[in-house]
Image (cartoon, rainbow, N blue to C red):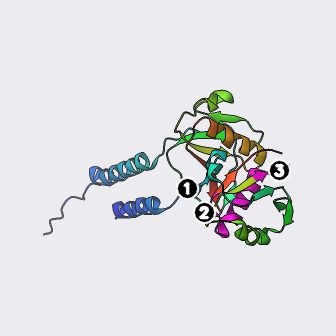
Amino acid sequence: MFRFSPPRRAHMAESVVPMINVVFLLLIFFLMTAQLQAPAAVEVVLPESEQGKELPEAVELFVSKSGEIVGGGLVGQAALALVTEGAEITVRADARLPGTVLAKLVRDLGARGAISIKLAVVSR
Amino acid sequence: MVDVVFLLLVFFMLAARFDTELTVALSQPGDAADYEGPPRLVEVYSDRLELNGILLTPAQLSEALRPLMPSESAVVLMRPRGDADVQRVVETLNLLARGGIANVVLVEGG
């Protein structure tokens, strides 16, 4: 006389709980690591460098290879007006931008009172 | 077990470096107010480098600058000329940094 227990039903609840755990972990991961950064206002290919420091929090100015300046949703001189006394600026200039334009921009930023001007590069 | 696998996945995703972006500090012409010693003007063209108007190879540049520097942190002026682009400017900054010259001021003109 054998008494077989009735076949166990698939534990639906048990197989769902780990999946929810994982989904929440991924959610938290992306929440923690996502850096809210505005998409590039103009297309910019950064120059390659073998030296440099990690990006600080600063005003970002994008400069396209044709010399168009965009920052904070503003274009040209209006973007430059964002630069105030004591501002820290990260210049994201295209690698093919003429160096003379970059030199002029650095002078203009200095004239507006920027205390720190950094050029964004990509690690080689 | 699936939990553990996904935990490991998340760990490696966290440990991975996504961003390879860095910044290079640019000094402003105003920082050159305390300029000392003989002229040190590096002119960067797209195809050549000149120090005080004398054509030099990239390898010679740091060596040629050294006797002109009153101190290790003395300012060197760098002027992009012609159609030298930002990549070229950064390459020259790298070249000077390799030679131990970190205080480079970008100037315009010409």
The answer for which chain carries disc 3 is: B
Q: Quick check: is B86 in the magenta stretch? A: yes
What residue is pinned by disc 1? B19
**Rendered-image quadrant of the N terminus of chain B:** bottom left
Instruction: Report, in whole angstroms, how far the alpha carbon at label 3 lies from the one at label 2.
Output: 24 Å
Most foreground residue, B34 or A53? B34
The answer for which chain carries disc 1 is: B
Instruction: Report, in whole angstroms, how far the alpha carbon at label 1 lies from the one at label 3.
Output: 32 Å
Q: How many labels does the image show?
A: 3
- Which dot marks residue B73? 2
Instruction: Check if mark 2's residue and mark 1's residue have beta carbons within 8 Å.
Output: no
Q: Are marks 3 and 2 on the same chain?
A: yes
Residue A34 seen by the camera = yes
Q: Identify residue type, mark 3.
A: Arg
Residue range (magenta): B79-103
Which of the 4 image quadrants contains residue A8? bottom left
Q: Identify residue type, mark 2.
A: Ser
Which of the 4 image quadrants contains residue B92? bottom right
